[in-house]
Each structure stands twice: as C-alpha cells, then as structure tokens.
C-alpha cells in the first residue's frame, strides 16, 4: 500500500478500501519542531493505544472523528481526510508558550477556555495566527472557523470530564481537523500525552511530553502510567 504522508510521529498509508487510511505510530519523539529528537521503543504503541481510547470515548459521547478502529498495537484505521493546515490549541490553564508570550503565571486558570490557531508550517515554525490570517491564507472561511472553535470546545468539555475521573487536570491540548470528500469537518490526527498537557490534580505532576521537553522524567514510564489510568476508566 502507498505511503501518503510521513510526519514526525506517524506514517499514513492507503488501504485496499477507498476512503480508508491506515496510520502507523512511530517510536520517534521530538520537541521544539524537531530541535530535540529521540527514538524510544514502545512510544508509538502507547500513543496509538491512548489515542484510540480517546477517540472511542469521544464516539461514546456522540462525537465522531476520523477514527474507525484500532488495527494493532501500533496501527489504526481512519477515514481519509484532507488535513486543514491549522493546529487548534485549547487552553484551560496557563502553561507552555502562552506563559512566555503573554507573561502569565504558570498554572493560572482561565475563566473561559482559550482557543488559538497556529499555522501548520514547519518552515515558518507553526506561527500563531489570527482568524483574519486564517481567512487571508484561504485555510477556512468564517463558518468553518466558527465550527472549528465550537468543536474544539466540545472536545475540551468531554476530555476535561474524562481527566476528572482520573484525578487529572487538562491544562491544554492541540488538535487537528480534516475534511472528508463531502467537505465535512472531522477531528483527525491524535490525542495523546504528546499533544496534551495533563497534570495530577493533587501534585501537579506532569503526565505528558513536558517530562521529555524539560528532561524531568522518563517519557515511557509517564505515558505508561497515564495509559493505565485511562484503561481503568
Ligand atoms: O507549546 P504550547 O504551549 O503552545 O502548546 C500548547 C499545547 O499544544 C500543548 O499541549 C502541546 O503539547 C500541544 N502542541 C502540540 N504540537 C505542537 C505544538 C503544541 O501538540 N506543534
């Protein structure tokens, strides 16, 4: 089957079925747009298991995504979509880039969740952009921008509830959407500790990629601990 896309953490292949792709999760881990890079045995498996579980949970809540089924420990079957070149970030508390950009205090809670758009473009280092920029670049129109924001907030509410059940706090996350052949917007890509910040409610311990970004712990141990909590739900 043909490789249609290879990113930092995943490979996407065609399948024999029209409109269905196979995603293979890789063991590569990167931070800072590839500035820091490693390979860790078992990382692809963990992110595939975690993402599959999140997409199944979203389905149970009536929220459909590109996810069809988990095929193996490291692979999923998904609906074919054209990825919209936006990283949609939702923030419930201040952490990461917003702390630096706006001089906020790490951990500061937002009364209303923030939705931000970043232009998915490695050469430009994925810059944060406004809704006017999204329209200028012909990425999405007003109606689609509204839909992306609404969907991001729906996903946020569902994920917050799941995290609560695990005594965890969802600080922020990044999602990507795609369009199927009818132009319907579908959640795509992944939801994993690579793409979310998750803190222990009592201790603020990280259950996410910050342990790798900041060299504060073992990524595999951290993701395994998170997966065990998710599995126990
Ligand atoms: O770095 P920043 O604070 O903007 O990240 C916000 C959230 O988006 C974090 O959960 C981070 O893991 C995620 N993110 C991502 N991929 C990127 C940039 C951010 O998954 N390229």
Image: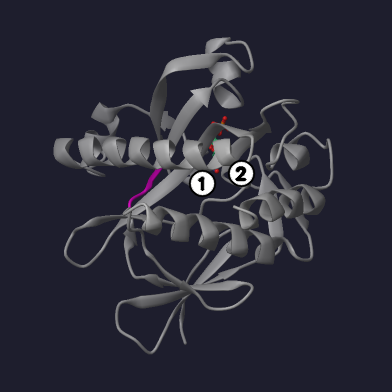
Relative side of 46 to 141, left or right: right
Contact between labelled residues 2 and 1, with CB atoms less than 8 Å apart? yes
Does mark 2 have its CB less than 8 Å from ligand 1?
A: yes
Q: Is residue 86 above or below residue 224?
A: above
Q: Is residue 88 visible?
A: no
Which comes before the other along the chain, label 1 or label 2? 2
Identify the image quadrant of residue 231: bottom right
Q: Residues within 10 Å of mark 1 (few under 14, many from 20)?
A: few
Mark 2 lies on a secondary structure that is loop
Residue 2 falls inside the magenta stretch: no
Task: Kindly identify the residue that appears in the image at 50 percent across and 44 percent down.
Answer: 123
Residue 86: horizontal and vertical position, in percent? 38, 43
Task: Kindly identify the residue that appears in the image at 27 percent across and 36 percent down.
Answer: 150
Task: Kindly identify the residue that appears in the image at 57 percent across and 40 percent down.
Answer: 165
Front-most of residues 53 and 208: 53
The numbered dot on residue 33 is 2
Q: Is residue 96 above or below residue 53?
A: above
Q: Is residue 47 above or below residue 164?
A: below
Residue 164: horizontal and vertical position, in percent? 56, 35
Q: Is residue 59 above or below residue 150?
A: below
Residue 74: horizontal and vertical position, in percent? 62, 72
The numbered dot on residue 122 is 1
Q: Which residues are magenta?
A: 84-88
Q: How is the image coloured?
A: one colour
Q: Give the distance between the C-alpha atoms of the residues marked 1 and 2, in whole angstroms.
A: 7 Å
Task: Kindly identify the residue that appears in the image at 62 percent across and 11 percent down.
Answer: 105
Q: Is residue 227 visible?
A: yes
Residue 100: horizontal and vertical position, in percent? 60, 17
């Amino acid at each position: 089957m043909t490789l249609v896309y290879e990113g930092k953490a995943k490979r996407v292949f065609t399948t024999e079925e029209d409109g269905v792709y196979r995603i293979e999760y890789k063991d590569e881990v990167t931070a800072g747009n590839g500035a820091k890079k490693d390979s860790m045995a078992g990382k692809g498996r963990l992110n595939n298991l975690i993402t599959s579980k999140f997409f199944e949970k979203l389905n149970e809540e009536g929220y459909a995504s590109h996810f069809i089924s988990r095929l193996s420990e490291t692979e999923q079957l998904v609906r074919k979509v054209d990825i919209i070149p936006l990283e949609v970030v939702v923030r419930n508390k201040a952490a990461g880039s917003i702390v630096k950009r706006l001089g906020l205090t790490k951990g500061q809670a937002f009364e209303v969740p923030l939705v931000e758009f970043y232009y998915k473009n490695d050469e430009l280092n994925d810059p944060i952009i406004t809704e006017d920029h999204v329209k200028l670049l012909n990425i999405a129109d007003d109606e689609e921008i509204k839909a992306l924001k609404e969907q991001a907030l729906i996903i946020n509410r569902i994920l917050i509830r799941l995290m609560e059940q695990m005594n965890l706090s969802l600080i922020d996350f990044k999602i990507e959407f795609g369009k199927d052949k009818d132009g319907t917007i579908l959640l795509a890509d992944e939801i994993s500790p690579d793409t979310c910040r998750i803190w222990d409610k009592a201790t603020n311990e990280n259950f996410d990629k910050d342990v790798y970004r900041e060299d504060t712990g073992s990524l595999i141990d951290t993701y395994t601990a998170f997966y065990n909590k998710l599995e126990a739900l």
